[in-house]
Amino acid sequence: MMSATSTLAMTHLVPLAKELDQNKVTPGVLGFIVFALIGGAVWLLMKSMNKHMKKVDFEEEPEDGKTPAAASSTAARGPKGERTA
């Protein structure tokens, strides 16, 4: 159910909406400014994300306590010492 205040507001806004020519309604300067601000915010967030991603070390620590260099060299070799990859 609609309250009396929302019904009153609707009756005053409907005639105003009918006066507007639907072919001439555009976002205008305010729409451009909002869109530009959102674009700038996304650009700054992407720049920050790239900076933080460069700091991340993607090498996992081995569970058995070996150093990463020793673990990677033994993992890359097969049982007879041949390279597998």
Image (tube, rainbow, N blue to C red):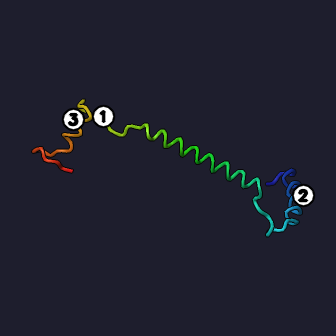
Spot occupied by residue 51 in the image (x, y as percentages of width and height): 49, 40
Q: Which residue is drawn at 32% across and 37% down?
A: 60
Residue type, label 1: Glu
Which residue lies under the disc numbered 1? Answer: 61
Picture coordinates of residue 20, whole percent (x, y): 85, 65
Front position among marks 3 and 1: 3
| Residue farthest along the bottom direction in this orientation | 23
Q: Residue at x 17, y 44 (%)?
A: 77
Q: Is residue 29 left or right of residue 36?
A: right
Residue 2 got which mark?
none
Q: How far apart are marks 3 and 1 (CA)?
A: 11 Å
**In this image, 26 relative to 81: left or right?**
right
- Residue that mark 2 sits on: 12
- Residue 58 lies, in percent from the top left, at 36, 40
Numbered label attached to residue 70? 3
Decide which of tag 1 and tag 2 comes sooner along the chain.
2
Label 2 to label 3: alpha-carbon separation: 77 Å
Disc 1 to disc 2: CB gap under 8 Å: no
Residue drawn at x 38%, y 37% is: 57
- Name which residue type carries label 2: His
What crowding class fits label 1: few (fewer than 14 Cα within 10 Å), some (14-19), or many (20 or more)? few
Q: Earlier in the sequence, mark 3 or mark 1?
A: 1
Q: Regarding mark 2 in the picture, which secondary structure is present there?
A: helix
C-alpha gap between disc 1 and disc 2? 68 Å
* SS assignment at label 1: loop
